[in-house]
Image (spheres, rainbow, N blue to C red):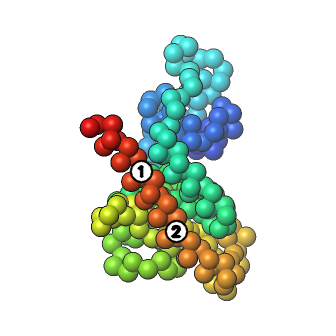
Amino acid sequence: MTQKLLTARQVKDILEIDTSTIYRMAGDGRLPAVKVGRQWRFPADQIEGLVNGAGDRADKPVPPPPLGVERELEEAVITMAAKALGVMMVYTDMNGEPLTLVANPCRRFESRAGDPTFVSECASEWRQFANDPDFRPQFRVGMHGFECARTFVRSGTQLTGMVLVGGIAPEGQTDSDLFVLTESERGHVLAALPDTAALLSRISRAFETNDKARST
């Protein structure tokens, strides 16, 4: 029989801890979890066992170690920018691997986040953005019917990551599952992308400088 798997949002409701903590605990082995595509999924029976007191005390969730300050700042920047702009946003490396959680997800993304095919397609699409020779942020309709745009994060002359926005209804269309932006709002999003990337780049450089100073 196929094992029932839970999403991070479902585990959040069961364990009453935030999703960022859930992902960290999955990553370091403190929660039973498996990777489906590029997303964590959680065996329902084992999660329910934690709640019901099954297993040894050592198997139960314990408070996570502090998230690295640099990653906390990056998460905060992406979250605040996504909410301020009214779009979905994520920060990835140049392979399309998320460095932060997807902030402010649209309903369409949330409703399909448990579908491994959907997750795999999103990851593949993010990787394709890295190979786009046009460096200017611009909207384009992705395979799931909503618009996305990206800009690069740099360290000197090297490209180190991408800031992607998405979940946006194509211009002139309305959809309750997507973010509907006016022409002015769309322009504001594209203009804000390089500023967001520049802030992430400054955060990275500041921590690199601090690490070098401590090593000398």
The number of numbered discs placed on residues in the rendered structure image is: 2
Seen in the picture, residue 207 relative to 85 is either above or below; the reply is: above
Q: Position of residue 7 (x, y in %)?
A: 58, 44
- Residue 28 seen in the current view: yes
Q: Is residue 145 left or right of residue 71?
A: right
**Residue drawn 40% across and 47% down?**
207
Q: Nearer the viewer, residue 8 or 182?
A: 182
**Residue drawn 51% across and 15% down?**
58
In the drawing, what numbered circle is on residue 71?
none
Quadrant of the image containing the C terminus = top left
Q: Element at badge 1?
A: helix
Circle 2 residue? 195
How many neighbours does mark 2 have within 10 angstroms: few (below 14), some (14-19), or many (20 or more)? few
First in sequence: mark 1 vs mark 2: 2
Q: Element at badge 2?
A: helix
Q: Is residue 41 left or right of residue 52?
A: left
**Residue drawn 41% across and 64% down?**
153
Disc 1 marks which amino acid? Ala
Seen in the picture, residue 77 relative to 149 is either above or below; the reply is: above
Q: Position of residue 33 (x, y in %)?
A: 48, 35
**Residue drawn 73% across and 70% down?**
176
Occupied quadrant, residue 154: bottom left
Circle 1 residue? 206
Q: CA distance from mark 1 to mark 2?
A: 16 Å
Q: Is residue 97 left or right of residue 60?
A: left
- Residue 127 seen in the current view: no
Occupied quadrant, residue 29: top left
